[in-house]
Image (cartoon, rainbow, N blue to C red):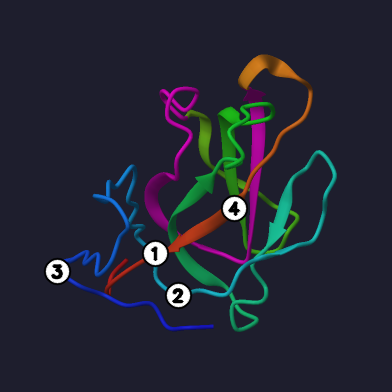
Amino acid sequence: MKSPATTDQVRIRITGSRLEPTLAELGLFRQSVATLPPTISDRSTKGTVSLSNLAGKTSRIAGFTYLPRQDGLLNGVVEKYRFETSANGATWTTNIADGSFANIQNNPSLQEVAFAPVSAHYFRFTSLRAIWGGGWTSAAEISVLPAGGSGD
């Protein structure tokens, strides 16, 4: 696995082509601060995701990201959600009770949600409503945003 690269500029050079080249699409993606991916500890309706693989200790987080499925279909894409954190997996604090991803049906791209930094060992992302209400939820990726700087 390669390390991420940072840059202030991007140059695209096309060094050969049979005809005049045309770019239809170009994408650059921001990567969150390196954290190990969470392991799923419970696939029930609770939606609990363990953060215990982050050095086996409680971590400071300041938000989360949700990437909907990227196959062009919208079935199961989360529209409304609840996000909770826990230090022990038994007592939960609601960080966002009734959040929504505005315009996700027309723009199913990476969603980044920030909240006041908290210490957590577990998080729970619960879909309250999916597009078209099919009774199930999908995600390409769910991750947490680490709290940055001292005092966070």
Tell me the residue that label 1 is attached to: 31
Q: In which quarter of the image is the C terminus?
A: bottom left
Q: Which amino acid does label 3 sit on?
A: Asp
Local crowd size for mark 1, using a 10 Å CA cut-off: few (<14), some (14–19), many (≥20): few
Circle 2 SS class: loop
- The disc, 1 or 4, on the residue closer to the chain's N-terminal end is 1
CA distance separating discs 2 and 3:
19 Å
User: For this rendering, which residue is in front, 4 or 80?
Assistant: 4
Residue 43 position within the rendered picture, expressed as x and y whole percent measured from the top left: 83, 49
Within the magenta stretch, is there residue 81? no
What's under tag 2, amino acid-wise? Ala
Q: Which of 74 and 33 is in front in this view?
A: 74
Residue at x-position 48% and y-position 50%: 65
Magenta region = 101-130
29, 72: nearer the viewer: 72
Who comes first in sequence, dot 2 or dot 3?
A: 3
> Circle 4 is placed at which residue position?
141
Image quarter hosting the N terminus = bottom right
Residue at 74% across / 46% down in the picture?
47
Residue type, label 1: Gln
- In the rendered structure, are the residues bearing label 2 and label 1 in contact, judged by CB atoms less than 8 Å apart? yes
Q: Which mark is residue 34?
A: 2
Query: Is 62 positioned to the left or the right of 36 in the image?
Result: left
Mark 2 closeness class: few <14, some 14–19, many ≥20 residues within 10 Å:
few
Foreground label between 4 and 3: 3
The residue indicated by pointer 3 is 8
Mark 2 against mark 1, which lies toward the viewer?
1
CA gap, disc 4 to disc 3?
26 Å
Tell me which residue sits at (75%, 55%) in the image.
90
On the rendered structure, is 14 left or right of 89? left
Give the alpha-carbon distance from disc 4 to disc 2, as whole Å: 15 Å
